[in-house]
Structure formats: C-alpha cells, structure tokens
Image (cartoon, rainbow, N blue to C red):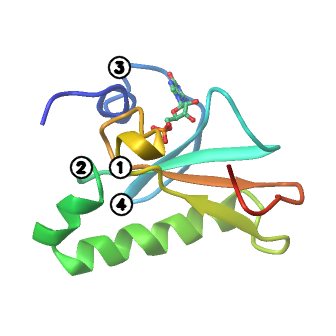
Amino acid sequence: MSETLFDKILKREVPAKVAYEDEAVLAFHDIAPQAPIHILVIPKKKWARFADFRAADPEAIGHYMISIAKAAEHVGLEAGGYRVVFNNGKDAQQTVDYIHAHILGGRGLRWPPG
Ligand code: 5GP
C-alpha cells in the first residue's frame, strides 16, 4: 500500500490537531470542517477501504468501531448525537486511500446527505 497523507499524520510527519488517541486509533480535526465538530478517526493498523476488512482480524475491526465511539464521546458528542460517515471509493469521493471515519456533530444534521 502506498503512503498517504494519513500515514504521515499518524507518524507525526504532517501536523494535525489531535482530538483523541488510544491503542487502536488516532482521531484528529478535519482541516475543512463540515460541522462545528468534524474529526477523522483512523485505525493505527492500516486498511485502505472497506474491502480490506474481508482479510482483517474481526477483533481489530471491532476495536476500531469501539474507538470511534470513544472518540465521539471524548469530544463531547455523546449527549447530542453525531453522524459517522465513511466515504468508500471513487464514487463516494474517498480522497485519501487510508480508511477513515468522519465524525460530524455539534449541530442538527440534515438527511439525506447529497
Ligand atoms: P475523504 O474525502 O477521503 O472521505 O476525506 C478526507 C478528509 O481529509 C477531507 O474531509 C479533508 O478535508 C481532510 N483533509 C485533507 N487534507 C487534510 C490535512 O492535511 N489535514 C487534515 N486534518 N485533514 C485533511
């Protein structure tokens, strides 16, 4: 897998405003926030996209999901709620080939998304 911007953020070669970190994930604020709180949560064990889950350890995937919930709670979104978005692949406008959950919250979010 070729190195992406998010590999460099994880290695602290590119600066980012870290919002939460644990053994499974790094969460940092999106540079172009689409909501008052908009963070990106990447697993420390890299997957590029959902298809990679097929060969992954289910326990590691589970840890990733739990840590997404922990990150959302850590930034204060548990009470009001939040949206978790994965843009997966070209048609969904995934621009960084390193799987990342967008957590969006801090205001009422419209549905459906575009
Ligand atoms: P995608 O479109 O792949 O689902 O999401 C990539 C996200 O990364 C976008 O929301 C974009 O604003 C964010 N992003 C792009 N470059 C940077 C950067 O250098 N730092 C941070 N923190 N976020 C970035």
| Type of amino acid at the residue the image marks with label 3 | Glu
* Secondary structure category for the residue under label 4: loop
Q: Earlier in the sequence, mark 4 or mark 2?
A: 4
Left or right of 3? Residue 80 is right
Residue at the spot 47% in from the left edge and 67% down from the top edge: 67
Q: What mark, if any, has residue 33 been given in the picture?
A: none
Residue at the disc numbered 4: 23
Residue at the disc numbered 1: 99
Q: What mark, if any, has residue 46 been given in the picture?
A: 2
Q: CA distance from mark 3 to mark 2?
A: 16 Å
Q: Earlier in the sequence, mark 1 or mark 4?
A: 4
Residue at the spot 85% in from the left edge and 70% down from the top edge: 80
Q: Quadrant of the N terminus?
A: top left
- Cβ atoms at labels 1 and 2 below 8 Å apart: yes
| Type of amino acid at the residue the image marks with label 2 | Lys
The x and y percentages for residue 101 are 49, 54
Q: Earlier in the sequence, mark 3 or mark 2?
A: 3
Quarter of the image for residue 22 reads bottom left
Tell me if mark 4 has few (under 14), some (14-19) or many (20+) residues whose alpha carbon lies within 10 angstroms of its own.
Answer: few
- Cβ atoms at labels 3 and 4 below 8 Å apart: no
- The furthest residue to the top: 14
* Secondary structure category for the residue under label 2: loop
Tell me if mark 2 has few (under 14), some (14-19) or many (20+) residues whose alpha carbon lies within 10 angstroms of its own.
Answer: some
Q: CA distance from mark 3 to mark 4?
A: 19 Å
